[in-house]
């Protein structure tokens, strides 16, 4: 009994993994792998070839298996030109199915790259050719939509150059944020399912945390944890900028006096980042690849799958580009420098934020609400009468926000009290006028979950329960969609193949266009959608393990107009 | 007497901070349905009116029709707009219970969610089948469902694997308490086993349960199945119980057992993890057993038969691997204690424990 060593435990874990019918892929059976290069090259032109393969990857002290494309992690920058026809031949050298989804691109649905929705997927050894006209410009990205390959490194940036040059900057860089973990993504998922809060090692303890005993008891009475900020953390993740960890000393050079455009892409699986360059204000010019009126900020929070383009005019010297994980468990760091070789010193990590009553969808001033109505709180935190009948309040729903409010003016967890300018959705205003359309139909989609069981869904129904019950839109229908977050996590919700307009208080013709919207904890976010891309599209939470747990739906747009699509 | 005091003391120690009743301040009124959101700063200033005018706030949106931005056919009739305005900004009558929340962004005149236009049902059920063929698509659709919500998994948790050293002398013992499960989110197969004995001697008690477990709420599972006790007497039981997370983060497990000889017994366990630091965790735990009737061959009397409060302090080297030390007070009570005394046995005792909590 005493000889129960850690080594034995590890060995038995591997044995269990082997026994529990997880087929061991070739790389895990000890075949040698080539090292993936950190960072990416560029592919462009009329005929682009991409090859997906297994690799080994190292950053700092962490190394492990990775899925690379053209031998790099992240995969190559796909540079397209507005107006061209993109032809992308993708070869799958893995021993499992793979795919590439072009995130944010408007294209015929059959080339959207979601196996089981848009196409059958790419079988091992096969080459699939994507071909579509490029109808837009801006900053986007691509990633696998098969299994959990995206976590393993199967993603990369896209830049589509505009026909008209933009005179506002002299130089541009991609700043692609992501994570690397030596842990197999399936093991991360299993740990999330079985070991509640496994990766969250910053919980409040008896000796840490400012929360009063009364508030702590209230949270534990509800069986909720106020430090559930991120499901997977720096405990296993190394945060990357362009494939480089903080110790890899990535430098982005500029000449003194230059205006630099940074194309910030959150290509991570699970991490919201707080992006700032201390001492250098950032002018936001695009959100999700779409032009917005310029707005000057000192920091912004970027949800998974979002992109922001900013222009900076740094003073002579070295400046740290800091991408701090929302839960402050680590950061990605690069130097923006005019002195080659000079490394900027990043600021220290800030303290982890703690959720508040507002994040539960309750009123602020918890003292007031807390003290008086705590007795009845159990009931009001999961009152089924507050949601429409099509929301299934079962084991997969641990909370119903008593009073969800629109939180588009919320800058993001942990950024509401910083002493500088932080971007909010309410700051975004489309630069070009959108066609005016009257809302024909309204709908509500409830984001639901159970943290303890790690179940996530829309309207209380996992994807497995609604495979035959898609969200249906008529072609060219204008629908106002309200997303109601009945959980205490922020969810980045992504609709494939479309841009929707955030109903953020901007006038009707200038609502900003986005492909991904963060719905803040216990709050709502509303968008207007003109469903003018016929076909079947995926709609899901872009937190990879939330999607994997079932937070996904298929959206259908019908019919195909004559001569289009099918 | 001493025993009663000891029992009370250790039960008190086992009561975590969180379970101690908090005082409800009754000098404040209960939460009102009609709060003043403006005074509380919940609303942007433009939506708040001066106090003396309890009127609807002005519509913040621009009127594109009046401004001539829109073709006339897209402008709703004037009366409908006016009809809408009071609900858009009116605070006085706001229903806080409704899921609409505070900021009303609903559009007047828009059809409700269910009124899906007929054309949305046109065309093939799966668009991709029209391009790639349903034969090619079907397997990928199945895989998609499997990968997005259809996951099955499992774990093994060794809750207690410990050596037990009686403080009043006597033989050292050992105990194990483990469970494992496999399945999806709702339906699972659960196996539980526990047992104990004296070091160097034969097993005294051992049981193994095989249960079907079904999630009946966000935090609780209903479990039913069989239990077999290889020791002491090879008895079989039917089991029905619940296991889950109670308010205040208590992990509880309670079950009824009906033996093949018709004896009904029950067992309840509860434990609580109090983080002292991020790795050091104090776990009060209590277990109680009950019998509906005397079971002479097991020296059990009807009523509460056994109470075991304990306190364990574990150090998580990693969450999966945590050695611990602790104390446990084990007491037979009521008639069962009388039977023990009549047999010349000591019905209670305090034990020091040292062991391991592990999962994988």
Image: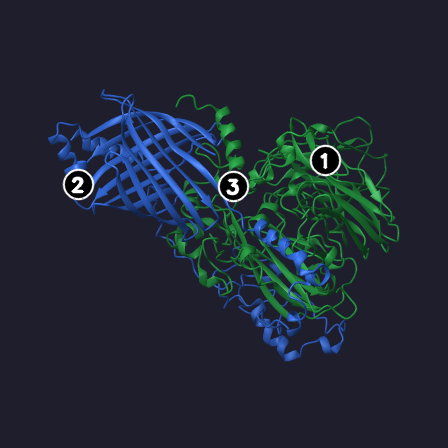
* Quadrant for the C terminus of chain A in the image: bottom right
Q: In the rendering, at what x and y percent does residue A318 appear?
A: 77, 31
Q: Going by the picture, which residue comes out furthest to the front?
A: B135
Mark 2, other Cα within 10 Å: few <14 / some 14–19 / many ≥20: some
Q: Nearer the viewer, mark 1 or mark 3?
A: 1
Q: Nearer the viewer, mark 3 or mark 2?
A: 2
Quarter of the rendering containing residue A344? top right
Do badges 3 and 2 share one subunit?
no
Q: In the rendering, at what x and y percent does residue A195 appear?
A: 48, 39
Report if residue B295 is visible in the image. yes
Residue receiving disc 1: A243
Q: In the rendering, at what x and y percent does residue A132 appear?
A: 80, 56
Q: Is mark 3 on a helix, strand or loop?
A: loop
Q: Is residue B296 left or right of residue A28?
A: left
Q: In this view, does A92 lie to the left or right of B92?
A: right
Q: In the rendering, at what x and y percent does residue B111 appear?
A: 61, 73
Nearer to me, A488 or A319:
A488
The shade of chain B is blue
Q: What is the chain identity of the residue bearing mark 3?
A: A
The Cα–Cα distance between marks 1 and 3, rounded to whole angstroms, is 28 Å
Report if residue B41 is visible in the image. no
Tell me the number on the disc at residue B295: 2
Residue receiving disc 3: A227
Of marks 1 and 3, which one's residue comes earlier in the chain?
3
**Residue depicted at x 40% and y 56%:** A379
Q: In this view, does A23 lie above or below A390?
A: above
């Amino acid at each position: 009994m005493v000889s129960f060593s850690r080594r034995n435990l590890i060995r038995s874990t591997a044995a269990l993994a082997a026994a529990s019918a997880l087929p061991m892929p070739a790389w895990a059976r000890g075949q040698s792998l080539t090292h993936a290069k950190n960072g990416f090259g560029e592919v462009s032109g009329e005929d682009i070839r991409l090859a997906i393969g297994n690799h080994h990857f190292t950053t700092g002290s962490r190394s492990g298996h990775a899925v690379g494309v053209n031998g790099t992690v992240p995969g190559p920058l796909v540079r397209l030109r507005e107006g061209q026809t993109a032809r992308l031949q993708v070869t799958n050298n893995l021993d499992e199915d793979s795919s590439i989804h072009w995130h944010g691109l408007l294209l015929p649905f059959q080339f959207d790259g979601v196996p089981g929705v848009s196409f059958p997927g790419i079988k091992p050894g096969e080459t699939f050719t994507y071909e579509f006209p490029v109808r837009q410009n801006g900053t986007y990205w691509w990633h696998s939509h098969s299994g959990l390959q995206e976590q393993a490194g199967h993603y990369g940036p896209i830049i589509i150059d505009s026909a008209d040059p933009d005179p506002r900057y002299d130089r541009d860089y991609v700043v692609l944020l992501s994570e690397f973990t030596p842990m197999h993504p399936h093991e991360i998922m299993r740990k999330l399912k079985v070991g509640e809060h496994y990766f969250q090692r910053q919980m409040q303890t008896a000796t840490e945390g400012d929360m009063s005993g009364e508030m702590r008891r209230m949270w534990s009475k509800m069986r909720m944890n106020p430090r559930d900020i991120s499901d997977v953390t720096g405990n296993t993740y190394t945060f990357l900028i362009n494939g480089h960890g903080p110790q890899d000393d990535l430098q982005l050079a500029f000449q003194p006096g230059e205006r630099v455009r940074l194309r910030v892409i959150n290509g991570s699986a699970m991490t919201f980042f707080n992006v700032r360059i201390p001492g250098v204000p950032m002018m936001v010019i695009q959100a999700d690849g779409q032009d917005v009126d310029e707005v000057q900020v000192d920091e912004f929070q970027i949800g998974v799958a979002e992109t922001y383009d900013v222009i900076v005019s740094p003073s002579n010297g070295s400046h740290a580009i800091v991408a701090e994980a929302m839960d402050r468990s680590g950061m990605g760091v690069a130097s923006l420098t005019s002195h080659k070789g000079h490394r900027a010193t990043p600021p220290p990590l800030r303290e982890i934020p703690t959720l508040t009553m507002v994040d539960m969808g309750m009123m602020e001033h918890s003292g007031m609400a807390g003290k008086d109505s705590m007795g009845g709180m159990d009931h009001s935190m999961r009152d089924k009468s507050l949601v429409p009948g099509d929301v299934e309040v079962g084991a997969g729903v641990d909370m119903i926000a008593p009073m969800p409010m629109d939180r588009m003016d919320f800058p993001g967890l942990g950024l509401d009290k910083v002493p500088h300018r932080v971007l909010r959705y309410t700051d975004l205003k489309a630069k070009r006028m959108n066609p005016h359309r009257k809302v024909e139909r309204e709908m509500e989609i409830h984001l639901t979950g159970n943290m303890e069981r790690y179940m996530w869904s829309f309207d209380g129904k996992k994807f497995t329960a609604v495979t035959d019950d898609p969200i249906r839109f008529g072609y060219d229908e204008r629908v106002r969609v309200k997303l109601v977050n009945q959980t205490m996590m922020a969810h980045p919700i992504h609709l494939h193949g479309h841009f929707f307009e955030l109903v953020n208080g901007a006038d009707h013709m200038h609502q900003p266009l986005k492909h991904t919207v963060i719905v803040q904890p216990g709050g709502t976010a509303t968008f207007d959608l003109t469903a003018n891309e016929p076909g079947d599209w995926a709609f899901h939470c872009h937190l990879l393990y939330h999607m994997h747990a079932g937070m996904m739906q298929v959206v259908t747009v019908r019919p195909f107009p004559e001569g289009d699509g099918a | 007497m001493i025993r009663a005091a000891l029992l009370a003391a250790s039960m008190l120690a086992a009561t975590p901070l969180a379970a101690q009743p908090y005082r409800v301040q009754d000098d404040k009124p209960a939460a009102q349905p009609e709060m003043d959101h403006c005074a509380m700063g919940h609303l942007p200033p433009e939506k708040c009116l001066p106090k003396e005018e309890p009127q609807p706030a002005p519509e913040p949106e621009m009127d594109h029709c009046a401004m001539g931005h829109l073709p006339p056919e897209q402008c709703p009739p004037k009366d409908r707009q006016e009809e809408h305005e009071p609900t858009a900004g009116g605070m006085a009558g706001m229903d806080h219970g409704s899921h609409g929340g505070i900021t009303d962004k609903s559009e007047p005149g828009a059809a409700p969610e269910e009124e899906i236009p007929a054309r949305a049902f046109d065309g093939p059920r799966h668009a991709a089948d029209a391009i790639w063929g349903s034969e090619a698509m079907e397997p990928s659709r199945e895989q998609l469902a499997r990968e997005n919500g259809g996951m099955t998994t499992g774990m093994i948790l060794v809750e207690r694997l410990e050596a037990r050293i009686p403080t009043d002398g006597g033989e050292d013992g050992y105990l194990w308490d483990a469970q494992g499960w496999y399945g999806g989110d709702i339906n699972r197969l659960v196996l539980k086993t526990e047992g104990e004995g004296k070091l160097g001697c034969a097993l005294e008690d051992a049981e193994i349960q095989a249960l079907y477990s079904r999630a009946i709420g966000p935090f609780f599972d209903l479990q039913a199945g069989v239990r077999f006790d290889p020791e002491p007497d090879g008895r079989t039981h039917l089991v029905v119980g619940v296991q889950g997370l109670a308010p205040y983060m208590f992990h509880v497990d309670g079950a009824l057992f009906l033996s093949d000889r018709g004896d009904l017994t029950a067992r309840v366990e509860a434990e609580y993890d109090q983080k002292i630091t991020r790795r050091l965790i104090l776990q009060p735990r209590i277990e109680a057993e009950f019998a509906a009737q005397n079971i002479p061959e097991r020296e059990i009397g009807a009523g509460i038969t056994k109470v075991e409060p304990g306190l364990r302090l574990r150090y998580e080297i990693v969450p999966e691997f945590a050695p611990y030390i602790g104390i446990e007070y084990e007491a037979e009570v009521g008639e069962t204690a009388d039977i023990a005394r009549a047999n010349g046995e000591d019905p209670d005792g305090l034990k020091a424990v040292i062991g391991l909590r592990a999962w994988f």
